[in-house]
């Protein structure tokens, strides 16, 4: 298959530009800041997420209604997300509106007003969001497993806590924004039927600024805890363990391991725990990978008296991967390669995958995915099943 036209360049204004040109009448564009929750200390945890919300409340060029209306009135989509290492502001529209989409994306990261009244209103919104995560049992245990896998402040929620968000003053928010939202920390990414020259012209419109981001050490740990709660009927449990990150040689082995263990209805955990034994409705695994950390999470919703049994079955299935055969390995590779091809249908999905690879070291690795997955050996995947330590969290009916 012919590789798509791909371009990458660092401009004189400091901005990194990545672009995949494809023959499709829509585009996705994003302005992403190389700063997320992993760079926050315990006192300001949640500030990146707060800023993500606040930039939509008004800029020097657009009020709160105009930001969304200018995109949605054209049939487009506008959104943003905050991760551990990146905060991304993106939109997707028909190709004829490329200049508009680029301008809105640029406007959000260069011109937010942070006005007092909208800021205080949005603080209440985020506090409700945090409560929602806490009230949802499955989200609760997934947040708690991160606490058991890492030390503070990295182990805290991306959204922050009730206490940290309540104490984020307007001054702190503006100071943080001014200290990290600079062109040397921005990736401008585009996927769609626009020329490289058009993309560069839009990227050059960012005013040149230069700021340094200070890294915070990520400390590993393991632990266990069982929480009790009234008013729930189901028990929720998660097993988590550290995995190879995006900079490590066996990063692709981790993807295959995750796919075999909990990827889809044909996965070993789904077949053994749900189909064969009927011990749950929901069971899923998820691999979180970045350049500085990586961990696997296995979530199950079951009955209170089956927690121990389910835990034993999960650990047994992990151990069985030590005896993985070549046919299963090749099937898992084929599945992942196929899923990547399907994901390429959407310009925004491709853009997010390119962003992840860029943050991991080089966006061009996205186009070597099939080659790198194909290179993984049986021994590479088998090795990951030898768990020395893991973390465990459960929330059970009181």
Image (cartoon, rainbow, N blue to C red):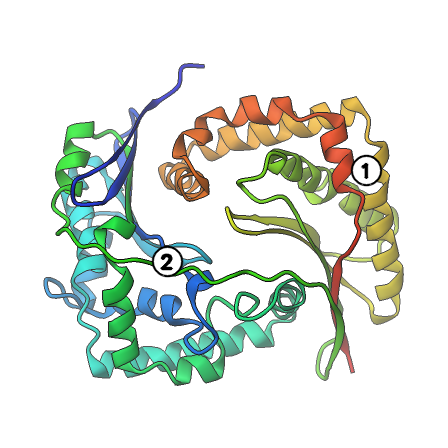
Quadrant location of residue 219? bottom right
| Element assignment for label 1 | helix
Residue 73: in sight, yes or no? no
Within 10 Å of the Cα at label 2, are there few (<14), some (14-19), or many (20+) other Cα atoms?
A: many
Residue drawn at (33%, 56%), measured in percent from left and top?
79
Question: Where is 1 relative to 205, above or below?
Answer: above
Tell me: residue 34, above or below residue 229.
above
**x then y, percent, for residue 94:** 23, 39
Q: In front here: 66 or 22?
A: 22
* Residues at circles 2 and 1 in contact by the CB criterion of under 8 Å: no
Q: Residues within 10 Å of mark 1 (few under 14, many from 20)?
A: many
Q: Which is nearer the eye, 120 or 359?
A: 359
x and y, in percent, of residue 257 in the image: 70, 38
Horizontal relation, residue 52 to residue 196: left or right: right
**Label 2 vs label 1, nearer the camera:** 2
Q: What distance separates the C-alpha of mark 2 from that of mark 1? A: 36 Å
Using the image, tell me which numbered label, if any, was put on residue 35. 2
Lower sequence index among marks 2 and 1:
2
Q: Residue 364 appears in which quarter of the rendering?
A: top left
Residue 321 is marked as 1
**Position in image of residue 321 (x %, y %):** 81, 37
Q: Residue at x 57, y 27 (%)?
A: 337
Q: Quadrant of the N terminus?
A: top left
Residue at 45% x, 79% y is 128
């Amino acid at each position: 298959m012919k590789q798509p036209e791909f371009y990458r360049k660092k401009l004189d204004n400091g901005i990194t530009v990545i672009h995949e040109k494809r023959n499709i009448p829509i585009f996705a564009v994003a302005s992403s800041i190389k700063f997320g929750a992993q760079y926050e200390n315990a006192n300001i945890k949640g500030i990146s997420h707060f800023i993500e919300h606040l930039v939509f409340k008004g800029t020097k060029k657009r009020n709160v209604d105009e930001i969304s209306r200018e995109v949605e009135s054209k049939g487009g989509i506008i959104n943003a997300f905050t991760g551990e290492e990146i905060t991304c502001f993106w939109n997707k529209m028909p190709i004829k509106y490329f200049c508009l989409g680029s301008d809105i994306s640029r406007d959000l990261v260069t011109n937010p007003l942070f006005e007092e009244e909208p800021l205080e209103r949005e603080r209440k919104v985020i506090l409700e969001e945090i409560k929602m995560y806490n009230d949802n049992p499955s989200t609760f245990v997934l947040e708690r497993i991160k606490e058991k896998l890492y030390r503070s402040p990295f182990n805290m929620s991306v959204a922050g806590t009730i206490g940290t968000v309540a104490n984020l003053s307007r001054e702190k928010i503006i100071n943080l924004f001014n200290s990290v939202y600079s062109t040397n920390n921005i990736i401008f990414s585009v996927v769609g039927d626009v020329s490289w020259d058009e993309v560069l012209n839009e990227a050059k419109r960012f005013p040149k600024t230069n700021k340094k981001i200070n890294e915070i050490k990520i400390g590993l740990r393991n632990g266990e805890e069982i929480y009790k709660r009234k008013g729930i009927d189901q028990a929720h449990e998660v097993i988590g363990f550290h995995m190879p990150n995006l900079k490590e040689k066996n990063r692709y082995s981790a993807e295959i391991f995750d796919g075999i263990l909990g990827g889809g209805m044909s996965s070993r955990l789904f077949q053994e725990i749900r189909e064969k034994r009927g011990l749950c409705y929901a069971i899923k695994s998820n691999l979180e990978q970045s350049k500085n950390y990586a961990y696997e999470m296995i979530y199950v919703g079951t009955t209170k008296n089956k927690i121990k049994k389910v835990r034993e079955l999960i650990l047994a299935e992990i151990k069985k991967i030590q005896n993985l055969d070549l046919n299963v390995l090749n099937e898992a590779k084929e599945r992942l390669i196929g899923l990547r091809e399907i994901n390429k249908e959407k310009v925004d999905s491709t853009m997010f995958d390119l962003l992840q690879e860029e943050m991991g070291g080089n966006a061009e690795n996205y186009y070597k995915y099939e080659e790198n997955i194909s290179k993984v050996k049986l021994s590479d995947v088998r090795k990951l099943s030898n768990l020395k330590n893991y973390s465990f969290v459960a929330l059970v009916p009181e």
